[in-house]
Amino acid sequence: MKPKLTLKNIAKELDVSISTVSKALRDSPEIGEETRAKIKAFAKHYNYKPNNIALSLKNRKTKTIGIIIPEIVHHFFTTVISGVEKVANEMGYNVLVCLSDNSFDKEVLNMEMLANGSTDGFILSLAKETMQKGDYHHLVEVINQGMPVVLFDRVVEDISCDKVIIDDVSGARKAVQHLIDTGCKRIGLLTTVDYVSVGKLRTHGYKQALADNNYPINEDLILKIEEMEDSELQIKEFLEEQNVDGIFAVNEHFAISAVKTVQDQGKKVPDDVSVIGFTDGELSRLFIPSLTTVSQHGTRIGEESARLLIEKLERTPSPDDYYKTILVETELVVRNSTKSKI
Amino acid sequence: MKPKLTLKNIAKELDVSISTVSKALRDSPEIGEETRAKIKAFAKHYNYKPNNIALSLKNRKTKTIGIIIPEIVHHFFTTVISGVEKVANEMGYNVLVCLSDNSFDKEVLNMEMLANGSTDGFILSLAKETMQKGDYHHLVEVINQGMPVVLFDRVVEDISCDKVIIDDVSGARKAVQHLIDTGCKRIGLLTTVDYVSVGKLRTHGYKQALADNNYPINEDLILKIEEMEDSELQIKEFLEEQNVDGIFAVNEHFAISAVKTVQDQGKKVPDDVSVIGFTDGELSRLFIPSLTTVSQHGTRIGEESARLLIEKLERTPSPDDYYKTILVETELVVRNSTKSKI
């Protein structure tokens, strides 16, 4: 009994990357002619089908939706899954979840697995590495073949499909405006590196709010965190160097690390330093002080994504079809980590 | 294009439960002969295959593992998934995740979907409703047909298969012993209803620790919580009635609710009341006071489950095969919600 040939096997066998195999089989000019020919010959010899989307479309009505998310130990993504489940189940669909672990290769492999007849369509939030590479051929191809895809949260313009996003810019703006309204003068930003779309947008919102209020934009007050692993240490060092009285963090963890650092410095939250986070998880709600935060409504994002996808699946395609982008509004939830308005 | 016939469609069409259809198709004597005949005739007419496990086994080497978990917005289960992913990926397997939402019907439907040729085997933690009903026919059948299954955490004796469990009894015992060692005299227990196996085992450990120390067992000090939704309120009422100086909670949420209630009563944790939880999530680690807790090592449970399953998948079955149960040890992580030893 031979194992099934997959992109991964071929890549290993020919000692090239998964992405190279994937592109060569799609005859992409990005791959040199010789390599392309070699890979195609190998695949043909072992009777590998690039993928069975065509087959899957013919047999559509697996009544199953695939979700690919970058991380699982993450409150926001688990709430999105709950939202997808809710709507999908109401409408008679099953849901399969896969993790990309923020890896480009895993995302490509997940799509290969799910497009092979197990699902009717996808709901996906891009892996960090995929955004960094800017390589979306695996998605573009699936979409071109007629499989509906909905991107949520981490989306890019280069991919034409239905999207569900939150108003990251205005969410961040509201948060920073609240810090200004409650008397903060030197507001620090704890964000991610720019290629993560949401980090970039929230940074944009932070700067807009400062500009709206004629505050100077001081790049020294912006910390861009690359690796989550040592974020605590980076935040500690940053707050030791920079004397801030307000902090806006683009996620719950950065916010909690900030509160702890401030307290370790013998200062008080919010009396000496106010802190606002993003993502309204349990951590924000139950922490003492409970955190003022920008709520993303993950469940609602999941619900909207499922509705968009199922709508596409159940409707006969028409030339008038167009892609929709649904903007889910954020909400500032004011709790005890910020001062009362002046 | 007709939708594929599923257990759910048949159940709906014939106005019977999913479980009835599932059992009738397996010729279970639990279902009356007439109903059985009707369901089988219907399925045959529409060419429904009870399931394609046989087919799936023949084509084995999808190189995919299915995980079915009861809840997703739950730190423990997400860490288990991470652990499964880690080992599975190292060994060249993909992972598909499904949620049962603690519903028996959804668990049966998930298994139908995954056993239909998409996976080589399962890793599963039972839905609350399945344990309450004590109906495991869907699992027993899959196992009897030769598909490897590993149960973790919420397991039952009635199912013969590989299992990964934690030492719930001794974990609870260690926790309560620590409360006793640090001077607590009246120790309350916040647990779940008995049909959830882990709740029952932890209750058992609590009682053992009390008996070990010649403490009386007072049923008034035990709160069994049925619905998670109003657990906060139930804990509040319980702690208003019962004057305790130590609390052992079988999960993180109950523990946090207890700390908050104690503080709202104007008392101090741990000076007036010590609190120990179960599950070492971020909430326990980052909460102030940080929580003393019994760590379950979810990642390790996931890793062990994946190893057990893949071992079965890659070995030629032999008459000497037997089922293993791996016990993953818990660990008491002492933090600031309990007093120092006397």
Image (cartoon, coloured by chain):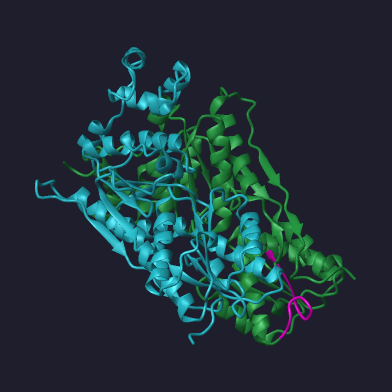
Chain colours: A cyan, B green
Quarter the C terminus of chain B occupies: bottom right
Which residue occupies 37% across, 63% down?
A169
Instruction: Please determine whether, in this image, residue A313 is positioned above or below residue A83.
Output: above
Magenta part of the chain: B267-277
- On the image, which quarter does residue B282 sit in? bottom right
Q: Is residue B185 magenta?
A: no
Which residue occupies 54% across, 78% down?
A338
Residue B32 shows in this picture:
no
Residue B55 shows in this picture:
yes
Residue A310 is left or right of residue A95, and the answer is left
Front position in the image: A141 or B26: A141
Residue B242 pos. (x, y %):
70, 84
Which residue occupies 24% across, 31% down?
A55
Which residue occupies 70% across, 71% down?
B289
Residue placed furthest toward the left: A319
- On the image, which quarter does residue A232 sit in? bottom right
